[in-house]
Structures are given as C-alpha cells and as structure tokens.
Image (cartoon, grey):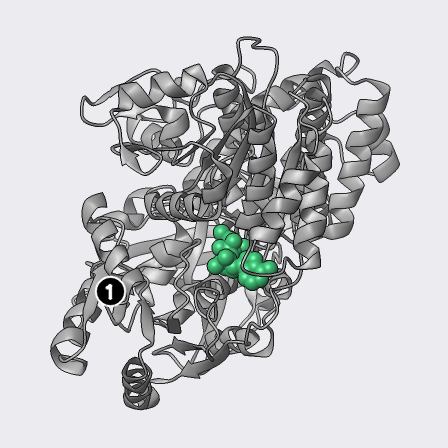
Amino acid sequence: MDISFPVEKIPRIGPQYQKRLKRLGIDTVGQLLYHFPHRYEDFSNLKKISEIKAGENVSVQGKILDIKNIRTFKKRMFLTQATLEDETGTIKAIWFNRPYLTNALKKNDLVFLSGKAAPKSNKYYLSSPAYEKISDKRDPIHTARLVPVYPETEGLSSRWLRYILQPLLYQLKNRIKDPLPEEIKKKRQLLPLSQAIWQIHFPDSLILAKKSRERFCFEELFLIELRALKERMKLKKEKAINVPVDLETIQKFVKSLPFQLTSAQKKSAWQILKDMEKQMPMNRLLEGDVGSGKTIVAMMAVLNTIKNKCQAAMMAPTEILAKQHYKTFNDFLKSFKVSIGFLTGKEYKLNNKKIERKKLLEKIEKGDVDFLIGTHSLVKGSDPLKNQRTPKVKFKNLALVVIDEQHRFGIEQRAQLAKGTSPDKKLIPHLLSMTATPIPRTLALTIYGDLDVSLIDELPKGRKKVITRIVPPEKRKEAYGFIRKEVKKGRQIFVVCPRIEPSKKSHDEILTEKDFIEKTSDLYEVKAVKNEYEKLSKNIFPDLRIAMLHGKMKTKEKEKIMKSFKKGSTDILVSTSVVEVGIDIPNASVMMIEGSEKFGLSQLHQFRGRVGRGGDQSYCLLFTDIPGGIYFRRLRALLSTDNGFELAEKDLEIRGPGEIFGIRQWGIPDLAMASLKDISLVEETRNAAREILKKDPELKKYPLLAEKLKEFKERVHLE
Ligand code: ADP
Ligand code: MG
C-alpha cells in the first residue's frame, strides 16, 4: 500500500463510508492522510482518581466495576452509568442517550476515560467522557492524549477518522516520501513529512502540532506558487499576434466619448495596449472598483485590435451582463464601422439583427465578425435545444479575449478559445480579465500570481458618495417611507435578498459543520425574493410598480424584466444577488439589502456600487434582523469606508478567502486557504518556489515534487 492506494480498498472502510469520503473529495489514502484535524482536545492530563479536581479536563485509567443503562422516567432518556476503579479510589461516569455503550464497555474492562470532572455533592463524576479500552498493542487515540478533532461532515465522526487513520499511519510510517526539497526544509526548519503527518494527527505536544501545521501550510502554498510561476514560464514561451497601437483611432475614440477618461483609465489602457504590441501573450487583470469604468478601457483594446484587422471576443458571466455589454459596445462604437456579434446559449445576433447560429459561426470563422460578445457558451459551444455539444466557435484571427469578472473564467477558457483561433494554431490570443473584486495583495501574489495587474484606483469625477445606513427592525417602516419618497422623485430601487425561496430547513442539505451551525442558528427567517416581492407589492407598496428577478427564471423573462427596469417602467426590482455584477442603471438611487449579515463585505460593496452612477445622491440601506453583535460590527465597516480594497482586506480577515472570491470550489486545501492571509508566509513560499524553478525549471532533480505538483494541478482548479 502507498498513498495512491484507493480508499475503497481499505477493508475497514465500507461502502457507506466510501461514499462519505468521496463527498469530501477523498479518493486515495494520501488524500485521507491530508484530511487534517482543525483542533485538539487536550486529554493529556492523566490523573489518579483521588487527585482529580472539580472542573478539570482529565483522563483516568482503571477497571470498570459495573456498567448499566437506566431509563429516566420524566425525560424518557437513557442514562448509562459506570463505576471506574484505580488503586486510589473509584469514580462514576455518566452518559446520556447512548444505550449501546453497554455493548462496547463491559464489567472488568480496562479502560481510559477522558472528560470533564463535574462536581456532585462532595464527590465528582465524569460527564459523558470519551472512552477507550486499554490495549498493549497500540497507543490510545480517543483518550489520554491530545486527541484530534476533525471538521465533521455528516456521518464522518472524529472517532471514526481516528480509528481509520491510526493504523494507516503505522502501516505507511516509512513509506511516505517527502515532496519538499531538503534544502527548503533545512533553510526554513520545516518538519519532515513522516514526522509531520504523524504529529498533525496524533501530536505529542501542542508545539509539535503547530510545527507540523506550519509545514503543511508551507507545502500547500508552495505548490500554489510553483504552479503560478510555472504557468507564467509556460506563457512566456508562447506567441501571440502582436497588435501595434493605432494612436489615431484611439484618439478619435477618446474624443467621441461623452466624458473625460480618468487618468487611471488612461494608464490602464496604455499598459494593455503596450502588452499587446508584444509577441508574448498578454495575461493581464484589470482591477477596478464597481463603476470605475473598466468597460471603456477594454473597449479601447478591442477597437485597436479590430483596426489591426484582427478579431476580439468578450465573455461575461451572465446573459444579462453580456446583453448590456453588447448594447454598450454597439452604442459607443457606432461611428467606427465594426461588426459585432452576440452569442449565448440561445440567442445569436450580428449588428443588432437576429441571425442563425450556423450563419453567425460561419461569419466568425471567415472573419466577417470583428468582435464577438457572449457568455460561457463561447467556449462551451453547447446547444441546449438539441441537448448536445456542438463544435466550439472558430475564429479566423482572434487576437484578444476579454473576460469580465475574472474569477469565473480564466486561463483554461483562453486555451479553449485559442484552439479555434487562427489557421496558424501556434498563436494564442492576448487575455484581459476584468474584476471589480479588489484582490488583496496576498491573493494576487498566490492564486493570480501568473497575472500582471492594472489598477483603476479612481472613480470618474462627479460621482457622489453613496450614503450607507444600517436599518434595524424598528426602523424598517421609516425606511419604507424613505423609499416611497425616492420613487415619487422618479428614482428606482433595488431590493436584494439572500435567497429565492424561503428555506425549508431540510436536514439533507446539511453537509458541513459550518452549514450545520448556520442552519441551526437560523432563529430568524432568511429573507427570500418570492416572499419579499409578495409583501412589497401587496402590503407595502401596492401602488408602485414592482418586479422580481432571480436566477431560476427563464432568460426571456429575465430580459423582459431588466429591460423594463432599465427603461424606468419598474420602480422597484426585488432580486437575488444576480444584480451583483455589472448592471448599470444610472437612475437607481437606493440599494436596499435584506438580511445583509448573510453577505460578505466585498459582496455588499458590490451591491452598493450598483447605485450612485447617475448625478443624484444615492443610498445603500443595510437591513438586518439581528442587530448588535458581530454582524453589526462587520456591517459598520461599510459605513466607515467606500474603499473596496480596505473592505476586501477586512473580509479576508473575517471570513477567509474561500467565500469572498468564490474560490471555495477551486479545491484549494483548507490549510492553504487559511494561510493565504499570511502575507509573510506567502512571500516566503513564493521566494522558495522561485529559487527552485530558477535552478531547475522542469523540476528534473525533484521528481517527488513534480509528481505532487501534477497531482495538485488535477485536484485544484484555479478558475
Ligand atoms: P465597471 O468598472 O464597474 O465595469 P462600467 O465600465 O460599467 O464600470 O462604467 C460605469 C459607468 O460609468 C458607465 O455608465 C460608463 O459609461 C461610465 N463611465 C466610464 N468611464 C467614465 C468616465 N471617465 N467619466 C464618467 N463616466 C464614465
Ligand atoms: Mg463591469
């Protein structure tokens, strides 16, 4: 057996458990060993029974004198009661509702019991202690030591994991090869794998547990950095179509705009255009707060590409947004004679006219379409009507791909688009990704380490700061009155709710410990679009025009609703977070967010950015039904700053990177996620990765590391 051994071949792991492990993404013994505890129960305090003090966490060893189940009358509960004896005395232990314990523990068994010593008159008893029979063949794992506690998934208890992991660790003791190069471990004083893997599960001391954790944090981040740097090296070897700057066209375009570009916009545009003059493919992230005007910057790059007789393409994360971009590009580029195509799963257009999909694809391939805008269907090319995958879009000479909201698309999509690019398949397009999510430096260095970054760090002039208020339950009525006034002034209102339908509180959905805690603490009701829509349109604002929008609606319907809101025919739009990205409604002046504590700061900041785009004073109202406490403090951060970066840093502190950047599903191991907050560790691992790659770019001298990196790439998708 080695670490690649599949878990289903381990005799102790039955089919039920195999399924549960799969659900956690654990297929191999190696992955199981990398399922780390998140804390330890300290049962290392081994005492004689006579020495026990009230309230302390202790372990005792002794013989069971008797054990029996008692049924309590009042509460209809099972009590299991045992008496344990050592050479200094006896102590009672009590468990609730675990009648099966009398099968596991019998009279005269030698056992460890670990738990809290609760006082009872002038004696003590152990309340629901952990138990374990004493064996001379192996060390205790549930008691009498630092006991690992794992993040629990339904049906996968810490006790079970300990029972499985200990024998595996014994078996593999000298067979796990360490992927970290010796010199790196030496320089940073990291524990060797064989010791660390043991100590992280069954530590001899908290110091060793910490040291082993440090080692694995380093390892995970190191792999992420290696991957990013290697990706960058790979890209350096590729070639793209070089697109020279057509200054005359750019000048003409800038003059045609109804506003002055900000200097940050100009600077970013310059960096992009300069990148595209090179043979090496651009890989640039354009970062800028909501409303900072990223689209115009991208448009300059697109126009320049077209003027050089090359094609450009743009992908947006939602159909609504793709539509909006299509309109914007058509409007702004009207006088430049470009042909712009539109392609989503169901809709195909060329120069604002409907066209058959087949025709559009032909024209793209012939080069008759200069610029193609769409959703992910640009790369997926699926035909939902026929429910089959049709060929991907083929271009004649695609030189630039723009991806809006980067963290949903990325490098792999470019690779796919590139496949259908030019007759000379060796060229790959330049890539510009855009995001309004401010990315803290640690993250930029790690997960986006292969990107160059342009930053639009100023908003267009004349934007008024959005006034932000927290609205506790008692102020709700007042807030509704305010909203009514705004509508009377001709303004429009966004209402955002955390979910579409009221929660069913189904227990099947509970998958993780975090889920569980959230769901069980749902003492109040999470606001849902459907309910709020009903309530607002029937009871609160029966005289106003209210619409609802959410992700489960048909595309046609969604469009109709957006169109009507854009036109001003709807006063209030109740929706889920679909309004988060990119929607541009200058007449909207109030962003009202229900259950605001359910959202992260960065996300709330994005919502807020949906208003304040016109000339009028705008407002962001953060409704919350649980005033006070941690949530309140968090929301207050939004009142104190409108700087997206500051908020992202705060968010990173509070929630960790997984939730904020939608990278939870990437499969980055939890440890690495947690350590992404640690800038010095991130820098250290980056330097280490650089050193190694400089010496040995192909990792020829480090086969174990190369193998680990390959496995990591398969497991973690940085998209
Ligand atoms: P985002 O960066 O959030 O994608 P957009 O590109 O959608 O922002 O721009 C938001 C709005 O600001 C659009 O209506 C756009 O036309 C306008 N805009 C862009 N640049 C400027 C500018 N320099 N001055 C004034 N308005 C601008
Ligand atoms: Mg945008």
User: What residue is disc 1 on?
Assistant: 528
Q: How many marks?
A: 1
Q: Is residue 304 visible?
A: yes
Residue shown at 57%/40% (left/top)? 433
Secondary structure category for the residue under label 1:
loop
Picture coordinates of residue 154, whole percent (x, y): 33, 45
Q: Quadrant of residue 585?
A: bottom left
Is residue 646 found left or right of 502 in the rendered image? right
Is residue 580 found left or right of 250 in the rendered image? left
Residue shown at 28%/62% (left/top)? 567
Choose between 259 and 166: the one closer to the eye: 259
Q: Amino acid at mark 1?
A: Ala
Picture coordinates of residue 129, whole percent (x, y): 44, 58
Q: Is residue 134 visible?
A: no
Picture coordinates of residue 77, whole percent (x, y): 20, 64
308 versus 292 height, above or below: above
Q: Quadrant of residue 57?
A: bottom right
Residue neighbourhood size for the residue with mark 1, other residues' Cα within 10 Å, grouped as few (<14), some (14–19), many (≥20): many
